[in-house]
Image: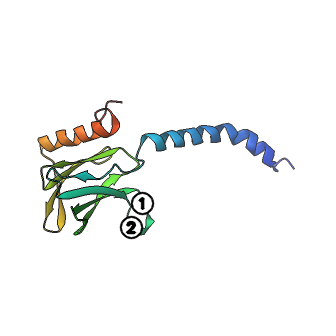
Amino acid sequence: MDAVIRTGDLFRRWHPLGIVVALLGATGLACFGGHPPPPVRSPSGHFVAFATISGPEAGGDSGAVALHVTDQSGQNEVTIQTHASDQMKWALAWNGEQSLVLYSADDGTTAYDLHAGSLDERAPTAGEQKIADDAYADRYGHPPGAQ
């Protein structure tokens, strides 16, 4: 009967580890990802950009950041699924009226140009990298990599 393990023995053996895992999980949820920031208006106010976090219904990666842009009336939505994960820190900002920049701790910075019903992904300029870093600092209270 040595092979029989009582439930009480398992609880006493693994309970401290469970507490550590729960604390680390709660800390991770508080520090990373979390809720998307509020919508961001373009400089003229004509467009609004906002993010959603995909779930299993998206057919892709659950927890990925999707960008949406609408005109001021809320019509004509344009959406693009990014490579950024909500499990990592990220921030979004406008660069002028037709471009967005997304800083992602796991994917780096990406620029998106708004063209007639689509968002076209491209590499950011040095100026856009600075805009993305500033957006990150505004959202998290420190520049990327400084904590």
113 to 5, vertically: above or below: below
Direction from residue 124 to residue 37 in the image, left or right:
right
Q: Residues within 10 Å of mark 1 (few under 14, many from 20)?
A: some
Q: Nearer the viewer, residue 75 or 65?
A: 75
Using the numbered discs, state the Cα–Cα distance from disc 2 to disc 1 in whole angstroms: 7 Å
| The C terminus, quarter of image | top left
Q: Quadrant of residue 63?
A: bottom left
Q: Residue furthest front?
A: 73
The amino acid on which the numbered mark 2 sits, given as a three-letter code, is Ala
Seen at 59% across and 42% down, the residue is: 22
Q: Nearer the viewer, residue 35 or 44?
A: 44
| Residue 97 disc label | none
Q: Position of residue 83 (x, y in %)?
A: 30, 55
Direction from residue 108 to residue 55 in the image, left or right:
right
Q: Are marks 2 and 1 in contact (CB under 8 Å)?
A: yes
Secondary element under disc 1, as helix, strand or loop, is loop
Q: Quadrant of residue 78?
A: bottom left
The amino acid on which the numbered mark 1 sits, given as a three-letter code, is Ser
Label 1 belongs to which residue? 62
Seen at 38% across and 67% down, the residue is: 58
Direction from residue 142 to residue 119 in the image, left or right:
left
Q: Position of residue 21 (x, y in %)?
A: 58, 41
Label 2 belongs to which residue? 58
Secondary element under disc 2, as helix, strand or loop, is helix
